[in-house]
Amino acid sequence: GAGVSQSPRYKVAKRGRDVALRCDSISGHVTLYWYRQTLGQGSEVLTYSQSDAQRDKSGRPSGRFSAERPERSVSTLKIQRTEQGDSAVYLCASSLVGGDTEAFFGQGTRLTVV
Amino acid sequence: ILNVEQSPQSLHVQEGDSTNFTCSFPSSNFYALHWYRWETAKSPEALFVMTLNGDEKKKGRISATLNTKEGYSYLYIKGSQPEDSATYLCAFYSGYSTLTFGKGTMLLVSP
C-alpha cells in the first residue's frame, strides 16, 4: 500500500516488559515521527528522525523510549520496562521533507500495559 | 519545549450549528501551522498546512485562518454535520526540531 502502516494494531504487555512497535512509512519520505496519544494528556512527540539517521532524536528525552530506523521507510519504537502509564495509542507519521509538508499517519498501535 | 494550546478541549454542538476553535502557538520563529482531523478508529488526516501570515484556507465547509504575528489560528466549521465529529489537532513547526501538536479539540455534533 501507499500509506503508513503500523503493526501490531493492538498490544497487551505485562508491566516491566519491553515492547517493540513497527512503522512502515511512505517510500521517499524523509522525516518520521513517533507520537503517543493518551486520554486527557493529548499527544506528545516521542522521537523523530530525518533522512537516514539510524538513531532517532528524542522529542522528550527518556531513557525508556528509543527508535531505530534500519531502512529509510521502516522504524521500530522500543519501550523498555513498560509502565501502566505507557498505555496509549502510539502513532507513527512521516512527511516528505520537514514540518512544512503535511504528515501522513498510520492507524496507530493501541498498547495496554497490565 | 514549545507550547501549542488548543481551546476548547471539547465541544458539543447541534447539527447545523457553525463552530470554531483556536490554536495558539509561539509567535517567534514561525514556519508552518498544520490542522488535522482525527476520526475515531482512523488515522489523523491533514486538513491544511499554512505558512503565510493572513492566509485563509478552505475545504468545503471547513476553513482556517492564520495570524503568525500574534500566534493563533482559527478553524471554522460552517453548518456542522454529525460526520464532522472528530478530534481536531493543530501542529506548529518552527523550522527546527519536530512538529509540535496541541492536545486537540474534541468535537461532537448531535443530529
Image (cartoon, rainbow, N blue to C red):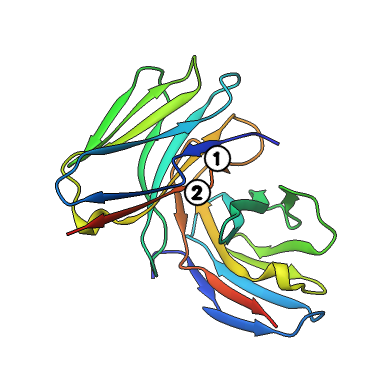
Q: Nearer the viewer, residue B98 or B26?
A: B26
Q: Which amino acid is tagged 1?
A: Gly
- Residue A103 in the image: x percent, y percent? 47, 49
Image quadrant containing the N terminus of chain A = bottom left
- Chain ID at mark 2: A
Image quadrant containing the C terminus of chain A = bottom right
Q: Identify the residue at image location x=64%, y=84%.
A: A12
- Please tell me if label 2 and label 1 are on a single chain: yes
Q: Identify the residue at image location x=37%, y=30%.
A: B74
- Chain ID at mark 1: A
The numbered mark at residue A98 is 1
Q: In this view, does B92 lie to the left or right of A48?
A: left
- Residue B109 in the image: x percent, y percent? 25, 55
Q: Which residue is tagged 2?
A: A95
- Residue A34 occupies quadrant: bottom right
How far separated are the C-alphas under marks 2 and 1? Answer: 6 Å
Q: In this view, does A70 lie to the left or right of A110?
A: right
Q: In this view, does A81 lie to the left or right of B73?
A: right
Q: Mark 2 touching mark 1, by CB under 8 A?
A: yes
- Residue B41 in the image: x percent, y percent? 39, 70
The numbered mark at residue A70 is none
Q: In this view, does A14 lie above or below B12?
A: below
